Amino acid sequence: MKAIIRPGDDKERPVEGDQVIFHCTTRTLDGVIVDSTRLEHGGKGNPIRNVMGKNKMILGFLEGIPTMTKGEVAMFKMKPEIHYAEEDCPITVSKSFPKNDELHFEIEMLDFHKVKVISEDLGVVKKIISEGQGWESPREPYEVKARIQAKTVDGKIVLAHDEEPYSFIFGKSELPKGLEMGIGTMARGEKAAIFLSKTYITESPLLPMVEDHEEVQFEVELVHFIQVPEGLEMCVRLMLPGEVALVTCPPDYAYDKFTRPPNVPEGAHVQWEIELLGFEMPKDWTGLTFQEIMEDAEDIKSTGNRLFKEGKYELAKAKYEKVLREYNHVNPQDDEEGKIFLNSRNSLHLNVAACYQKMGEYRKSIETCNKVLDASPMHVKALYRRGMAYMLVGDYDEAKKDFEMMISADKTSEPDATAALLKLKQVQQEAYKKVKRQFKGLFDKKPGEISEVGSDTKDDKVQGNAEHETENTGSGKENEKKDPDGDATTETLLEPEPIGFLGRIWPSGRRIFAALGLNRCTIL
């Protein structure tokens, strides 16, 4: 039941996707206050901030709040099953809370407005005050200029606007973490309010850690950010997909205001040849159903796949990463949606890893595969892709572990894993042969003689053949065993080699030379 204590100022009411900000005081039917957000009633003075349809709320709030207008004060009388005694209630309360009693909830609706959810846990939320221009947003490592003001939820100003915009490099932790996330969704000229919960108010040169405050609200005007030379951007805006154009710009529209490449002299006119492959307007996923979000993500992913097949790996990676950034704002509602979402996100990460491999950035490929394996440790495709990256970077032991783990994770992957292990052995043997050829001449001379690295004389070849025959025939007792790959090997039991001076001061070096078959050597 609802009783209006004070009418609101407007006829509009909050709907799903709106952020609602309200004070709430909870009383028993005989007037005893059991909980409140107000200072005068023992609370912290911080109003509740929830996003309709996103935050977990008691059933009574879900039914009652959409009936209110801005500025309205109302009293709701709720039975236990409609508040905290609700079956599978999403909100927990203390044991002393009278959740099995009928209660009065006095709510004052302070404000509500459309917002864009930036972080999945609703710790970063943005309200657009006025739209910006263009479609591009700041990203690392753009130089950004913005006017920024910060205040706590009780209205205390902790950072005032300056006449001069604040300049910073995006991605260098010069702003609180959540604020940078919010600015990363803004367009040039946009004004927005960005709400941060405490976990996203990290320490930074702009704003020291705000203690004793659960939330901080930032008002931001994105004045400018440097992305590409101004003349280049102006001309691209006039082009159509598939068009190829020559663009000539004077210095003030080229590199006078932008980082100048080393081979471009100061004051030079610059000409670019541009082919516009395509463009798209970013779609705001706020308010879309999970199915609609997944369909839009699949469309963008398909574009990335096409670019990958065309060999445009950097562009393909940008497409995949675009979807992954937007996925930070997606909140699956049940286990089935969660499974679909996880599979899609893993697939995108593995596509990014494939792009890094094609671009020769193998360490980044490994890091990207780790994001999948952190969530799904036995993900076969991620193990395979990471193993290939380890092999390409020369980390053969780690590659072998990943390929072997594939078989443990899924027996059907054994043919692929076996082929990968065979390829790994070939690559490893080639690497050892190359190193052995490179250093062979350095170690086959008597003390006092000088040999050039990589020499390959006739005597060297004869000696090498002799060594090869000795290895094949062996001496002493032999013990046949199986290595982890399942191939038969021969282990010869010989007298242990005496450890020389070099072996004592550089044990790891001794093991390296031993692996190359260069146990006995003298270094001058």
Image (cartoon, grey):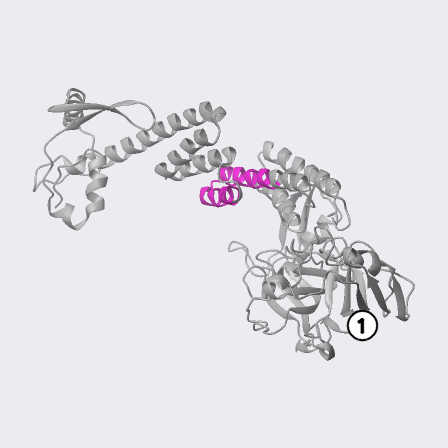
Report the magenta residues as a range: 345-374
Closest to the observer, 171 or 399: 399
Look at the image and say whether residue 276 sits in the magenta stretch. no
Q: Is residue 1 left or right of residue 346?
A: right
Closest to the observer, 368 or 75: 75
> Where, quadrant-wise, is the N terminus in this rendering?
bottom right
Q: Is residue 378 above or below residue 194?
A: above
- How crowded is the residue under tag 1: few (<14 C-alpha within 10 Å), some, or many (20+)? few
Report the number of discs: 1
Q: Is residue 245 above or below residue 221?
A: above
- Looking at the image, can residue 481 be seen? yes
- Residue matched to label 1: 30
Look at the image and say whether residue 349 sits in the magenta stretch. yes
In the picture as drawn, the residue positioned furthest to the bottom comes out as 40
Q: Is residue 184 above or below residue 316?
A: below
Q: Residue at x 55, y 69 (%)?
A: 204
Residue 314 pos. (x, y %): 57, 42
